[in-house]
Amino acid sequence: MDYRDQLLARRAKLEQVINEKQARLTTPISETTDELSIYDQHPADIGTEVFEREKDLGMLEMMEFEKEKIDNALARYEQGLYGVCENCGKRIDPARLSRVVNTTLCIECARNRENRYNYNNDTISNGILSISSMSDKGEAFQVAGYEFYEE
């Protein structure tokens, strides 16, 4: 399977999960719980539902961002720029492209970016880590202990 097919397969999977989460999130909480009323004797139960919804919203946002990165990689593929580091212009190692199919950085540039946002470095206190700087490392995201792509 070539990189374009991998990108399209990843995009299709993301779109499916995004659509499922959006459908789940548009259902009112009162319809997703077994409670007869939101005002119950056990308000912590509703609190748990609200927490789960917030977690799903956060995961949905990250998945939509990941889909944007895949769309960007597909555009780069069509332009003949896929597999070329957008920072230094070197070829990205095929093993890295297989692992992080939507990456736009070679391993050296990704490590340099990672070092820039290292928790031991003072630069972290001057800003906020963005999802894009984290995903370029090729590590899986976790939200509340769940893997980013867990269904």
Image (cartoon, rainbow, N blue to C red):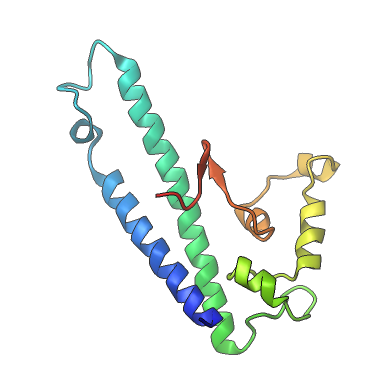
Q: Residue furthest top?
A: 41
At 51% from the left and 81% from the top, the residue drawn is 1
Q: Percent position (x, y) of residue 81?
A: 64, 85
At 37% from the left and 63% from the top, the residue drawn is 15
Q: How many marks?
A: 0
Is residue 116 shown left or right of residue 23? right
Q: Is residue 52 above or below residue 124?
A: above
Q: Residue furthest right?
A: 121
Q: Quadrant of residue 44?
A: top left
Q: Quadrant of residue 91?
A: bottom right
The answer to whether one can see residue 139 in this image is: yes
At 45% from the left and 49% from the top, the residue drawn is 150
The answer to whether one can see residue 104 in this image is: no
Q: Percent position (x, y) of residue 118?
A: 79, 46
Q: Is residue 83 above or below residue 44?
A: below
Q: Nearer the viewer, residue 20 or 123?
A: 20
Q: Percent position (x, y) of residue 134?
A: 66, 53
Q: Nearer the viewer, residue 60 or 34?
A: 34
Is residue 52 shown left or right of residue 118? left
Q: Is residue 112 above or below residue 76?
A: above
Q: Nearer the viewer, residue 77 or 128?
A: 77
Q: Percent position (x, y) of residue 49?
A: 33, 29
